[in-house]
């Protein structure tokens, strides 16, 4: 997990899927960090990007999600974005990405009931 006051990344496994949870604001200032985390997921398994704790995405952060979607698709893998009731839902709708990486309502309910919520450490607690 990588964390600071404004944003954090945590990764975990859920069933046969890799999960990356993003918290806070994601924009051009931390694009490289986001890209490194998303590329580091690989393409061997399906990926869920948990955006329930994300508060802001600019176009560069969206471009990184699209890049991950393309890399996974080239390997016949799937990317899903779990947004819950966050403002990320509206962002995906406005950009029409909800049709590509959105989670169907029944799947979203299943994930929200079973997917553990990421826990965050302060920067001083990280190894």
Image (tube, rainbow, N blue to C red):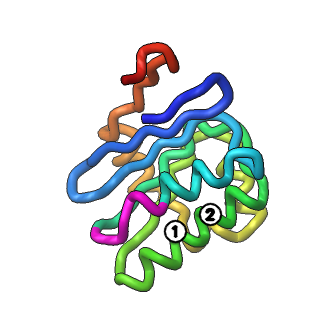
* Local SS, label 2: helix
- In-front residue for pair 10/127: 127
- In-front residue for pair 50/122: 122
Q: CA distance from mark 2 to mark 1?
A: 6 Å
Q: Is residue 125 left or right of residue 67?
A: left
- The circle drawn on residue 64 is 2
- In-front residue for pair 45/126: 126
Q: Is residue 28 left or right of residue 7?
A: right
Counting other residues with Cα less than 10 Å from the Cα at mark 1, is it few (<14), some (14-19), or many (20 or more)? Answer: many
Q: Residue at x 27, y 47 (%)?
A: 13
Q: Residue at x 44, y 80 (%)?
A: 73
Percent from the top left, x then y, of residue 119?
Answer: 41, 25
Chain part drawn in magenta: 39-44
Dot 2 and dot 1 residues touching (CB under 8 Å): yes
Q: Is residue 75 left or right of residue 123?
A: left
* Residue named by callout 1: 68
Percent from the top left, x then y, of residue 29?
Answer: 75, 46
């Amino acid at each position: 997990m990588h964390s600071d006051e404004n944003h954090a990344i945590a990764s975990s496994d859920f069933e046969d899927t890799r999960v990356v949870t993003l918290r806070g604001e994601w924009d051009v200032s931390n694009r490289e960090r986001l890209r490194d985390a998303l590329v580091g997921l690989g393409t061997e398994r399906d990926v869920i990007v948990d955006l329930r704790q994300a508060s802001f995405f600019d176009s560069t952060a969206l471009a990184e999600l699209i890049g991950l979607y393309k890399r996974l698709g080239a390997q016949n893998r799937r990317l899903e974005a779990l947004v819950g009731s966050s403002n990320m839902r509206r962002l995906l709708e406005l950009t029409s990405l909800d049709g590509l990486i959105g989670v169907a309502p029944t799947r979203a309910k299943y994930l929200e009931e079973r997917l553990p919520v990421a826990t965050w450490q302060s920067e001083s607690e990280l190894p």
